[in-house]
Image (spheres, grey):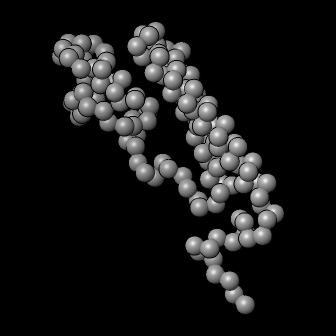
Amino acid sequence: MIGTIMYQLTKGLSNEQIKKAGFDAYFVNHTAGVYPSSAAGVPFSAAAIACKGDVITDLHEDLAAEQKARTTYDNILRLIDDPDVREPIKFLREREIVHYQRFGEGLRLATDKMNEKNFYAFNPSFDKRFK
């Protein structure tokens, strides 16, 4: 959705508008195409996806990711007045809140089940039982 918003905001810009907006360095490398990167310009990489294969660790990572995304959307909303941009960003922000709540429920359920036999202490895809 963010990529679509960026496309809508940049399509049809004149060379002068591109320069005036400070978009020229980006435009030289990517034209008006969406190139996923951080605010610091670091390109997206699958290395940014944190997964340990441990349900408790991974759920905490998911919770943190949802909060980071919500904060980003909060910051965008502080800077943007255009209702055509604000409305989809508000939707995305609300979605992050719901995701956070669902991951929290998942963490609670996983934690509640930790004392059940072979839950969490044994990963059948990796661990082998030795007698």
Q: Is residue 60 left or right of residue 70?
A: right
Q: Position of residue 92 (x, y in %)?
A: 51, 27
- Please tell me whether residue 117 is drawn above or below residue 36 in the rendered image: below
Query: Is residue 32 or residue 113 the one in the foreground?
Result: 113
Q: Is residue 52 left or right of residue 22?
A: right
- Please tell me whether residue 102 is drawn above or below residue 75 in the rendered image: below
Which residue appears at 67% of the width and 36% of the height? 101
- Please tell me whether residue 5 is drawn above or below residue 102 in the rendered image: above
Which residue appears at 27% of the width and 13% of the height? 20
Q: Position of residue 105 (x, y in %)?
A: 70, 43
Query: Residue 25, can we see it?
Result: no
- The total of numbered circles placed on residues is 0
Q: Quadrant of the N terminus?
A: top left
Q: Position of residue 66 (x, y in %)?
A: 58, 37
Q: Is residue 24 left or right of residue 4?
A: left
Which residue appears at 42% of the width and 10% of the height? 82
Q: Position of residue 85 (x, y in %)?
A: 42, 16
Q: Quadrant of the C terminus?
A: bottom right
Image quadrant assignment for residue 32: top left
Query: Residue 43, can we see it?
Result: yes
Q: Residue furthest bottom?
A: 131
Q: Is residue 113 left or right of residue 29?
A: right
Q: Residue furthest left?
A: 15
Which residue appears at 64% of the width and 81% of the height? 128
